[in-house]
Amino acid sequence: MAEIKLTLKKKPEFPLEADSITPDNFSGKSIDDIKALEVYIGNQTAKLEDYFEVKGDTGEADDLKIKIDGDLSNVKRIGQEMTTGEIEIDGDVGMHLGNQMKGGKITVNGNADDWAGAMLEGGEIIIKGDTGHYTGAAYRGFWKGMQDGVIRVEGKIGNEAMLWARNSKGANKWPTLYCGEAGSFLGIHNHGGTIVVEGNVDRCCGADQAWGTIVVKGSISTKLPSYKKVGEVNGVELPNGDKIKGKFVEYSGDHSVRKETKGRLFIAA
Amino acid sequence: MATRKIKTVYDVVCPFCGTLCDDLEVDVEIATDKVVEVRNACQIGTAKYYSSNPSPHRYEKPMIRKDGKLTEASWDEAIEKAADILTAAKRPLLYGFSSTECEAQGKGVELAEILGSILDNTASVCHGPTLLAEQDVGVPTSTLGEYKNRADLVIFWGSNPVHAHPRHLGRYSEFIRGYFRKDGRNDRYVVVVDPRNTHTAQIADMWINVNPNEDYELMNAIRAVLRGIDLDDENVAGVPKDKIYELVDLVKKCNYGVIFFGMGLTQTLSHHRNIDTAVCMTRELNDHTKFLITPMRGHYNVSGANTVFTWNTGYAYSIDFSRGYPRYNPGEFSSVPLLMNDEVDASLIVASDPASNFPQDSVRNMFKHPLIAIEPHETPTSAFADVVLPAAIAGIECDGTAYRMDHVPLRLRKVKDAPGECLTDKEILERLIKKVKEKLGEK
């Protein structure tokens, strides 16, 4: 696999929008062409080489790995709409990481800011640290958020993760989020997303869920009044085939959306 | 005894709150051009008219900061300095606009596009969450006249119009006689949902004492009960189960209900999700009866700012032109987070006073960088500005268009002339646009 290494030269004074950093954009380009790709800072346009050192071997997108080093907490939109290849980031990363990504893999050995994996359509995002709010969420006003793919966050995620997630049984698409802990309004307006939380979740979990599955292995600070207890179960099978072991209390909801619902919330017994 | 010659201007639209009362009568003494009497307005509206009279706090000439002190300058000098600041900035912010008229707001959009700046209005710290929720789930709403003539159940949720919109109750929602509500107050049942026993709650028929920050849970429970679900919990958000059933029974039985909501929903813990669920609840109530919902907008023309920005850019607030086309993302492009992260390197504040309302850290960051204020009076913001451009007060010293809280456009009236060298917000922004274009070499 060809590998291109980007090293941040200096922390940008304003957020740097680097949506040009994707394997698709680097595909088949020489190092000099990659250095000349555009990035945006404030109302100015700059070149990738103004902020990054670029080294390595070029190749085709599906055989390309981009490795990025440095404190990227002020660099936004890395991996936007990527379809293939791989990105690995050593350090924290800014907003909109891998938004609208369709395929490939992103690994972050650090934290990610808000909107990581927003409106994900495929591929996999692995974040070793925490993420901000709206992880895997729909952008403002969209009724279809994350539609496929997997996000794995080892740490805590912020509020309103998986907002308006939407599965498709016919197309075999199962948007899935695994995380360590979660903030409030996890899986709000969920339409078929699957969420597994290793630890605790803040208030209003599964608010307005039409259908979908949320599994919480820890506890919830306050359960919404519109969720009704169904019974106790031993293990949960997720729609994507994964099996979660353990004893859970099964709740149906959100009943504020409809009286009979396939939405399920499992909380560790 | 000398006679005092007075002119009276009738049917004046009040430029204070979103109720936009349009029945004011203003007396102006001709010799001195002073407002001497305001009839029909509430105390706050009256005070705004009197504020246009000569005072030491009024700017009458442009000012530029020289050697740390604001000193008087000519319009040409001030516009030149302002244009220099704006064109040198990489991430300028244009903020305010809600207390001026629509024509000036339109010019603000034009300037933002030329500069590639951030464009924001006061909705971002006020009813911005309402707009976010409306984009997610829509909004069933109507004009205030409909409510006046038809509503027999009025719910004030997290809003206190007795103090914030004093004439709303008398003109539209509580005491007024309507076509189908001939007996006024006696024909309406008024419910207030608020953690505090506000003055609005004290004159209501029912007060629901919800726990602070738990409005979402309460509405969620109401929605479940509306779906025919029996609640497991005995008590939701501090409200007993029986009270929730009583309220649901009440709202289902009314002929025409309306929810007016304010900052108590938009600026408490769940922010836009409170409005999201309130809108869904209103929508579901229409399975049983007629029900609508309307935000109690604060600034008199904040609806106008949202409307003008939307027809120009597609978005109501928190707009970023840095890449040449408008993008929208509150939280990323709204004023407070940008200033908190120190991402703004110059600000132009139009008809607003963020220094009094924004969090301290963001104000501190705003003052670190060049600041231009278009403002009639001295405010905590303009006192720290590098350039002050004195403006005529829209709706008093110049005419223009404003949108009421229910999006009805009304024509503001000019009742007197502006003092000194004051220009209207629109003229000031036009001069700035011309100068900025010159500097950027655009036509």
Image: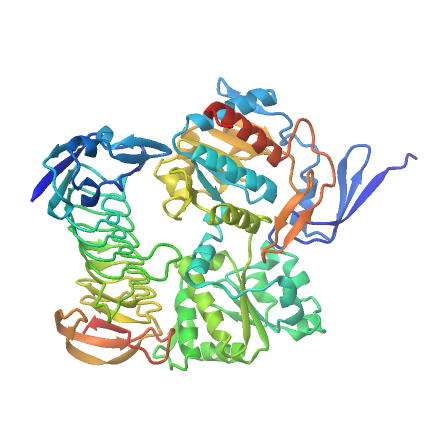
Residue B92, percent from left and from top? 43, 33
Percent coordinates x, y for residue A77 in the rendering = 27, 44
Q: Position of residue B128 (x, y in %)?
A: 46, 52
Position in image of residue B113 (x %, y %): 47, 37
Residue B307 higher or lower than A45, as above or below: below
Identified at 54% across, 77% down, the residue is: B289
Residue B232 visible in the current orientation: yes
User: Does residue B174 lie above or below B32 as drawn?
Assistant: below
Asked whether, in this view, residue B132 is left or right of residue B383, the answer is left
Quarter of the figure that contains the N terminus of chain B: top right
- Residue ID at (19%, 71%): A239
Residue B174 at least partly seen: no
Q: Give me the residue at 65% from left, 64% from top.
A: B145
Q: Nearer the viewer, residue B235 or A243?
A: A243
Q: Nearer the viewer, residue B19 or B40?
A: B19
Q: Residue furthest top?
A: B67
Colouring: rainbow
Q: Residue furthest front?
A: A28
Seen from this angle, which residue lies furthest right? B1
